[in-house]
Image (tube, rainbow, N blue to C red):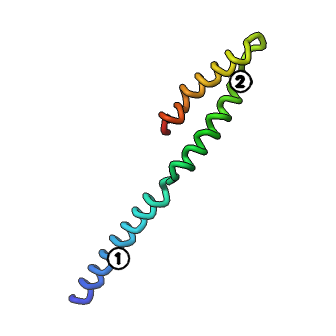
Amino acid sequence: MMVSEKIKDFLTKLLIVIFLFFIGYYFLMGSSTQTPEEFDKEFIEKFDACVERAKNRCDEGISETACTDYAMNRCETFLGTKENPIIK
C-alpha cells in the first residue's frame, strides 16, 4: 500500500512540474520580445512600405505633396506615428 501511494504522489508531482514547464516555455517563447531599437526599426520599415503602397493609389491629377500627405495620413490611421504607435 505504501509503495503505490509513493508512486502516485511521485507521478502527480512529475505531471505538475511538466505542466508548469510547458506553461513557462509557452509564455517565454511565445512572446516576440524586441528591444526598443528593433521595434523602432521595424515600425519605420512598415510605415515606409505603407506610404509607398498608399502613394501608388494616388490619382494622376493630384500633386506629389498632396499624394504624400494622403499617404502619410492613411498610414498614421492604421499604424500610428513613431512617437505613438498603434500596437497590434
The quadrant holding residue 67 is top right
Is the residue 42 above or below the residue 35 in the image?
Answer: above
Question: In the depicted view, which residue is nearer to us: 39 or 7?
Answer: 39
On screen, residue 78 versus residue 9, left or right, reads right
Q: Split into 4 quadrants, where in the image is the N terminus? A: bottom left
Q: Count the numbered circles shown.
A: 2
Amino acid residing under circle 2:
Lys
Percent position of residue 7, x then y: 30, 84
The residue drawn where x is 59% and y is 28% is 75
Is the residue 31 above or below the residue 41 in the image?
Answer: below
Amino acid residing under circle 1:
Leu
Is the residue 26 above or below the residue 75 in the image?
Answer: below
Residue at numbered disc 1 = 14
Percent position of residue 83, x then y: 49, 35
Dot 1: within a 10 Å radius of its alpha carbon, few (fewer than 14), some, or many (20 or more) residues?
Answer: few
Q: Is mark 1 on a helix, strand or loop?
A: helix
Q: Any mark on residue 55, and which?
A: 2
Percent position of residue 69, x then y: 63, 20
The quadrant holding residue 56 is top right
Q: Is mark 2 on a helix, strand or loop?
A: helix
Percent position of residue 87, x then y: 48, 38
Foreground disc of the pair 2, 1 = 2
Furthest-right residue in view? Answer: 60
Is the residue 2 above or below the residue 55 in the image?
Answer: below
